[in-house]
Image: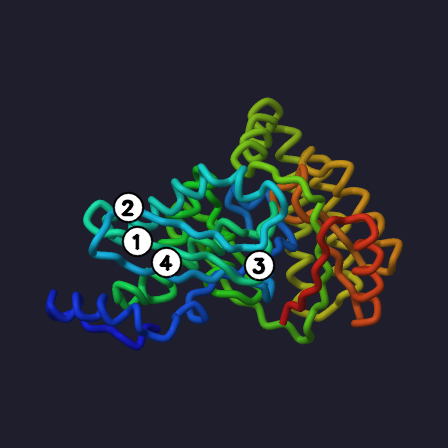
Amino acid sequence: RSSRQSKNHISQKEDSYQQFATMTSHRDQSRGYGKLILFGEHFVVYKVPALVGAVSAYTDCEVEFDESTTGVTVIDDRPAVPGYKEQKKAEADVAIDLVLKHMDVDPSKRGIKMTFGGPLSPVSGIGASASQVVALARALGHALPKPMTEDEINAAGYEGERGYHGTPSGIDNTAATFGGVLKFQRTDGAPIFTKKKLPEPIRIVYASTGITSSTTKVVGDVRAKKEENPEWFDGLMEKYVDLVERGEKALDDGDVNTLGKLLDENHALCQELTVSCEELDTLVDAARSAGALGAKMSGTGRGGLMLALTPTEEIQDKVAEALGKIAPQVWKTTFA
């Protein structure tokens, strides 16, 4: 993607570093998208399929090298919910370090300044950490310069996600890298994912509870419950596998009415998993009352986000207005 791909001689690379400061910003090419999980939060960790849609909002990044200094300088201009960046800073520092190591960039040899921005508002559930590290990987590729395939960007994003989540499923960084609506499945090796072609665009409203939750902690709690009562978890898993198959068919057929009902069923499964909470349930109920075809929590849970499926622009506006009265932040997006 970089327009500067000199790689034959060290002198050429040094020259490109000096010229980088005067180059047109690559930030518009260094994006990582946010995401909403339609089906599969928590279950996806155990190697069953999930369906995820990238939102139109993104994080972008610009990287500059400084030969006169060392270390990492991070400027985080993302429009986060109050407290999010502070709570996530330690994890973010680890994530950034992992991406730098993965890409063989050593800040002890020269300084690195990275500036994060973009319209995506980091909240629990939107994949903000993945959008950040994917944007960073793209920006590093431009700044070095180092040509990178989308798969290489995705791999670097996965490494960064380890700083936030320990052992991530890979679904967030894949959506952040490739965009669109994806079917994703974790394996013992590389994840399997396919981009879905939707017959018609799908209108979504999503809203934040304002509560920042820890993915590592919530995933760990679910794992502990699974180990404590495997029969209970296996029963939920069986319901989920059937549910995601029907959800994929509804997506492929453009059957939004069935899709809405299945989103409701997935929310009920999340409640049984104990990863929903009163604040999420209240927003889900409000969206349904305002005309949404279906609604559910999305992402980590115990705070974070919910989403609602709306069949028309008019109902999308109506649901957004209703949620805006009780949620600190509300957004509209379209999956296509």
Query: Is the residue under label 3 in contact with that under label 1 (CB below 8 Å)?
Result: no
N-terminal of the two: label 1 or label 3? 1
Q: Where in the figure is residue 263, as x and y percent of width and height?
A: 73, 53
> How many residues crowd around disc 4 within 10 Å: few (fewer than 14), some, or many (20 or more)?
many
- Label number found at residue 137: 4
Q: Residue 39 vs residue 174: left or right?
A: right
Residue 75 shows in this picture: yes
User: Which amino acid, mark 2?
Assistant: Gly
Furthest-front residue in this view: 68
Separation of marks 4 and 3 at Cα, in angstroms:
17 Å
Q: Where in the figure is residue 321, as x and y percent of width and height?
A: 82, 60
Furthest-right residue in this view: 289
Separation of marks 1 and 3 at Cα, in angstroms:
23 Å
Figure check: 21 above or below 130 = below
Of circles 4 and 1, which is in front? 1
Residue found at x 44% / y 39%: 167
Residue found at x 70% / y 68%: 202
> How many residues crowd around disc 1 within 10 Å: few (fewer than 14), some, or many (20 or more)?
many
N-terminal of the two: label 2 or label 1? 2
Residue found at x 84% / y 54%: 288
Q: Which residue is mark 1?
A: 112
Q: Residue 195 vs residue 105: left or right?
A: right
**Element marked by disc 3:** loop
Residue found at x 72% / y 56%: 330
Separation of marks 4 and 2 at Cα, in angstroms:
17 Å
**Element marked by disc 1:** strand
Q: Which residue is mark 3?
A: 120
User: Which amino acid, mark 3?
Assistant: Leu
N-terminal of the two: label 4 or label 1? 1
Separation of marks 3 and 2 at Cα, in angstroms:
27 Å
The one nearer the camera, 245 or 219, is: 219
